[in-house]
Structure formats: structure tokens, C-alpha cells
Image (tube, helix red, strand yellow):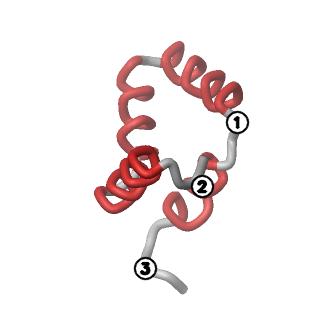
């Protein structure tokens, strides 16, 4: 079994496949439940440093569009 928590192994990949609309609805529900929960979700769902760099490279080079 992997040492990574379930949230990293299963939930994060599932959340990342959500449409922008579905993710927006999830964020609205979390905001309604309390701003702290929304902030925690956004922090948890934020890509790591390598993911941010890869995203920036795709935007700069036009790859992945």
C-alpha cells in the first residue's frame, strides 16, 4: 500500500477531472459551509511547485492548448 494519503491517491485526481463549472459549485458549497473550509480545499487542491512550473511552461510555450 502506498504511504500517500487517500486524498492524494484518489480524491485529488478525481477533483482535477471536474469541469470548471462542477469545481465552482463544489467551491461555492464549501464557502457556504465556512470560508475556512474553502481556503483549506484550495490549498489542498493547489498543484505542487513542479505542477505550477509545468503549467507556466505550457502557457508560455503554447503547448497543451
- Identify which residue is drawn at 55% across, 67% down: 9
User: Alpha-carbon distance for marks 3 and 2?
Assistant: 15 Å
Local crowd size for mark 2, using a 10 Å CA cut-off: few (<14), some (14–19), many (≥20): few
Q: Position of residue 57 (x, y in %)?
A: 38, 54
Local crowd size for mark 1, using a 10 Å CA cut-off: few (<14), some (14–19), many (≥20): few
User: Residue tagged by mark 1?
Assistant: 19
Q: Quadrant of residue 23?
A: top right
Mark 1, mark 3: which one is toward the viewer?
A: 1
User: Alpha-carbon distance for marks 1 and 3?
Assistant: 29 Å
Q: Quadrant of residue 22?
A: top right
Find numbered disc 1 in the image and state the secondary structure of the residue it sits on. loop
Q: Earlier in the sequence, mark 3 or mark 2?
A: 3
| Callouts 1 and 3 close, C-beta under 8 Å | no
- Identify which residue is drawn at 53% across, 13% down: 32
Q: Position of residue 16 (x, y in %)?
A: 60, 48
User: Residue tagged by mark 3?
Assistant: 3
**Residue nearer the viewer, 39 or 57:** 57
Q: Earlier in the sequence, mark 1 or mark 3?
A: 3
User: Residue tagged by mark 2?
Assistant: 11
- Identify which residue is drawn at 65% across, 30% down: 20
Extreme residue in the top direction = 32
Find numbered disc 2 in the image and state the secondary structure of the residue it sits on. helix
Residue 35 horizontal side relative to residue 64, left or right: left
In this rendering, is residue 27 above or below 43? above
Find numbered disc 3 in the image and state the secondary structure of the residue it sits on. loop
Residue 61 horizontal side relative to residue 19, left or right: left
Amino acid at each position: 500500500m502506498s504511504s500517500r494519503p487517500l486524498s492524494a491517491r484518489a480524491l485529488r485526481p478525481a477533483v482535477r477531472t471536474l469541469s470548471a463549472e462542477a469545481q465552482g459549485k463544489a467551491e461555492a458549497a464549501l464557502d457556504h459551509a465556512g470560508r475556512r473550509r474553502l481556503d483549506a480545499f484550495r490549498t489542498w487542491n493547489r498543484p505542487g511547485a513542479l505542477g505550477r512550473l509545468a503549467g507556466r511552461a505550457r502557457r508560455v510555450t503554447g503547448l497543451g492548448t
